Structures are given as C-alpha cells and as structure tokens.
Image (tube, coloured by chain):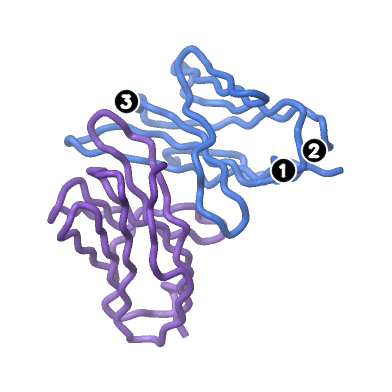
C-alpha cells in the first residue's frame, strides 16, 4: 500500500461547480498535512496547510480526519484558472528527520 | 518570500557525462531535498540533507550523489548520466525545527541522449 494515495482523476468539472478531492495516508504518526497545486510543467506551490479543526481560504476548504486517516480539499465555484494537479503532502518525523511524502496528484480540469 | 533557485533550467547531456544540478535557497533553511518527477510516478525523493555536510538517501538514490558544503547550497550529481535519468528534477527546502512547509525551485529539465 502506498503511504499516500490520491485518485489521479482527471476530474472534469464545469465552471462554477463544487469539486472535492480526498487523500488517504497510511502512517498514523503523520503530523502535518498540506495541499499543493502544480501547473503543467511547473513546480508545486503551497496551496494551503490542513489543520485538525479544518480551515478555509476563500473558495478552498481543507479538512483532516485523523481517525480515518484522510485529508480532503473542497473547491467551490470552480474557475478555469483552478485547472491544475493537486498534490497532498504528509509529514512526519522519524529519527529526528522530517519525512515528507507526496501523493501522485489529482488532475482537475475546469471546462467552460 | 522564500526563494529556491535552480540555476540550470534546461539541459541536454550525453550518456556517460557527469552532470551537476545546483540549488540555492535564501531563507537559511535547515532541510534541503532533491526530487525527480516523472509522469505517472509523482515526486520521488532522491536525497535530502538536514544540515551542512549531512546527507541521507531517499527512495531512489542509485546513480546520484549530493553535496552540501554550505547551508544555502545543495547540489545533485549524476556521476554517469543514463537515458533513464531523463526527467524533471526539483530542489526543495524547508525550515526544519519550527516549520516544515516545503518550498520548491522551478525545476531542471534534464534530457540524456
């Protein structure tokens, strides 16, 4: 089983739609969680951190469910500019080192 | 803003050549990473470093080595480039203690012919 799993998609949604992605992780000792956005042929960029209580940034909402070991990203009122690949990232510490694991990403295509 | 700079953006090298990929970060981060990214495989960790002169193998270190002589600089070395090392290489850094957000450079596209 992969440490971090995401549905690769693609998710094709019309403008204005609401779309949600899930990401499951296997290491129960994972401590911090993030969503990154990656445009085609570009580097990943931080979209938002994911906090235990859930957090919102404009049209984006991230949630963490530690009991079921998954994180989610909800995008409301999708824009064409939201088209990208969304990577979930899970951190834990082992032997004093930061261990970072990336999902393979979920591709979103917002269509007019 | 954090800046991670990969000086070589696009390279074409011949099989067997030694290749150096340089990465510099300007935020005094403790941790630095090298990844490669290939279609369908996602990001795979090659090496990481949590301090000057320290290095740890990631998931796919074979065929690579690294050097971190100064805190701000982390170099990836392909000792003898092979065609299966054609990929996008991403350098990243994170603060270490007190912060673990990863910041990426723009990537280096390497083609080995």
Under circle 2, the secondary element is strand
Position of residue B35 in the picture relative to residue B95 (left or right): right
Residue A13 - label = 2
Q: What's the residue at 51%, 61% (across, down)?
A: B38
Residue topped by disc 1 = A81
Q: Residue at x 57, y 42 (%)?
A: A37
Specify the farthest residue to the right. Answer: A112
Label 1, label 3: how far apart the Cα atoms are: 35 Å
Residue A80, horizontal then vertical, whole percent: 77, 42
Mark 2 / mark 3, whichever is N-terminal: 2
Q: Earlier in the sequence, mark 1 or mark 3?
A: 3
Q: Is residue A97 left or right of residue A4?
A: left
User: What residue is drawn where x is 28% and y is 71%?
Assistant: B77
Who's blue, chain-wise? A
Which of the 4 quarters of the picture holds residue B69? bottom left
Element carrying mark 3: loop
């Amino acid at each position: 089983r992969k440490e971090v799993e995401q549905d690769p998609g693609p998710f094709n949604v019309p403008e204005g739609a609401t779309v949600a992605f899930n990401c499951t992780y296997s290491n129960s000792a994972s401590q911090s969680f993030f969503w990154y956005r990656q445009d085609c042929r570009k580097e990943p960029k931080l979209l938002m951190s994911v906090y235990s209580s859930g957090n919102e940034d404009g049209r984006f909402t991230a949630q963490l469910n530690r009991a079921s070991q998954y994180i989610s990203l909800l995008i409301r009122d999708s824009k064409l500019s939201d088209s990208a690949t969304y990577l979930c990232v899970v951190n834990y510490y082992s032997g004093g080192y930061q261990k970072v694991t990336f999902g393979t990403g979920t591709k979103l295509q917002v269509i007019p | 803003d954090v800046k991670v700079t990969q000086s070589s953006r696009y390279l074409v090298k011949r099989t067997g050549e030694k290749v150096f990929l340089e990465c510099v970060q300007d935020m005094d981060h403790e941790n630095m990473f090298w990844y490669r990214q290939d279609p369908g495989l996602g990001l795979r960790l090659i090496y990481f470093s949590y301090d000057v002169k320290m290095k740890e193998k990631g998931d796919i270190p074979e065929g690579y080595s690294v050097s971190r002589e100064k805190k701000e600089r982390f170099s990836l070395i392909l000792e003898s480039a092979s065609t299966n090392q054609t990929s996008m290489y991403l350098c990243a850094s994170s603060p270490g203690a007190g912060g673990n957000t990863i910041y990426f450079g723009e990537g280096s596209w390497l083609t080995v012919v």
